[in-house]
Amino acid sequence: MKRPEGFDPKGPDAEQSAKRKRGGEKTPSAAATPPRSRPTPPRRPDPQQPTPQQPTPRQSAAARPTSGTPRRPTPPGGAAGTPAPTSTRDRRDTTADTGKPARQPKPQRRPRKVAAATTERQARRELARAARHRRRFERGEVKRFTRRSRSRRRVWISLSAVVVVLVGVLAVAVYSPLLALRTVSVDGTARVDAAAVQKAVESQVGTPLALIDYDTITTQLARFPLIRSYVTELVPPDTLMIHIVERAPVAAVVNGATFDLLDPAGIVVQSSATRPEGVPIISIGDQDAKSAAFASVVEVLLALPPEVLAQVDTISATTKDNVTFALRGVGQSVVWGSSENSAYKAKVLAAMVAHEDPASKVEYDVSAPGSVVVTPR
């Protein structure tokens, strides 16, 4: 190659170029200007490969990519020791010249392959979890659909338990000797001997209260004519109480040399050799206590108020329609007639007796209570 005129290969420029070569620098020239680099379009990240790491701040400026704008070359007369910008290829050469290894990019991580045994264990766990969930769901459905039957079963069990308890209590009450009869108590007696009544029902002592024979008690107490009625009461654990209502005499009849006290049913309550005080004497002829005349007399006596009944001395009737009686004192008498409307006749008579003078001897005729006739005697 032909050199230009005046070119000195040993001039100052040649010496400076040699120094730069020894120092690893290139001679500044137009060829040393870095070429304009074209920006590389960004690549789409691969989902299966990890994203490469960005360069760290510790990397040198020479390892970083150059910008898109080229730098102007340093003139030959520039500051000494300032290196000119280099390209990527120049950086590789420089690294090779200096003897330092170039930094390689980190290898991309590949996805790990799951072992077949691990996958099988996971599948078994999932199957076991699904089976447990299925069994739990089935149990819930069974409980939901059998709730009504379980409720009915509980009700029947409760009722059966109650019945068993009641049967047990009844069995204890009926057959247990703890509830057997040991004491007989009698009250309401005046003319009836209470000890005789207790002795009459003595056969029931020792019997459980629930098994007492009341028919036998009725038969035994029927032997006492003065007992009009009675009521039994059980007092646990071992007592039987008998409440007696005695027959009350309403009148007396003459029976030969004695006086027999009769109750409204015509039963002889008591016999006495003397006339009993405060009791009227009934005269019905030769008729007995079952006749209509006796029934009419008793009905009249029961209808009279106590203040008038206490004044009756004798009462007589031959039929049911001709009842008459005499009052104590001066000999006042009453014509009653039949036993019909006895309550109304008793009120009218009580008013007339209270209005009349007790010392006057009169006859009261209340057979027609709407028109009472008072006749002096």
Image (cartoon, rainbow, N blue to C red):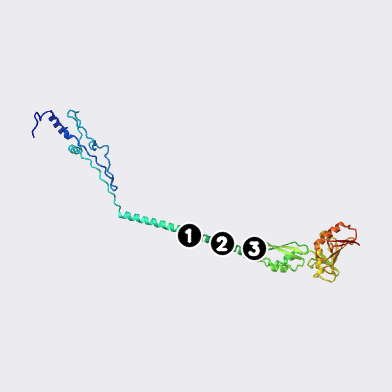
Image coordinates for residue 239, horizontal then vertical, percent:
68, 62
Q: Is residue 261 visible?
A: no
Image disc number at residue 176: none
The answer to whether residue 252 shows anywhere in this view is yes
Callout 2 touching callout 1 (CB < 8 Å):
no
- The picture places residue 331, in percent across and down from the top left corner, at 89, 62
Identity, as a three-letter code, of the amino acid under mark 2: Leu
Amino acid type at image mark 1: Phe
Q: Quadrant of the N terminus?
A: top left
- Name which of mark 2 and mark 1 comes first in the sequence: 1
Dot in front, 3 or 2 = 2
Element at badge 2? helix
Q: Residues within 10 Å of mark 2 (few under 14, many from 20)?
A: few
**Mark 3 crowdedness (10 Å alpha carbons): few <14, some 14-19, many ≥20:** many
Numbered disc total: 3
Q: Residues within 10 Å of mark 1 (few under 14, many from 20)?
A: few
- Circle 2 or circle 1, nearest the eye: 1
Residue type at mark 3: give it.
Leu
Q: Which residue is mark 2?
A: 159
Which quadrant would residue 68 be assigned to in this image? top left
Considering every residue shown, the one lying at the far bottom of the view is 286
Q: Which residue is mark 3?
A: 179
Indicate which disc, 3 or 1, sits on the residue closer to the N terminus.
Answer: 1
**How far is mark 3 from mark 2, CA to CA?**
27 Å
Of badges 3 and 1, the one in the foreground is 1
Q: Which residue is mark 1?
A: 145
Q: Are marks 3 and 2 in contact (CB under 8 Å)?
A: no
Dot 3 or dot 2, earlier in sequence: 2
> x, y percentage for residue 285?
85, 70
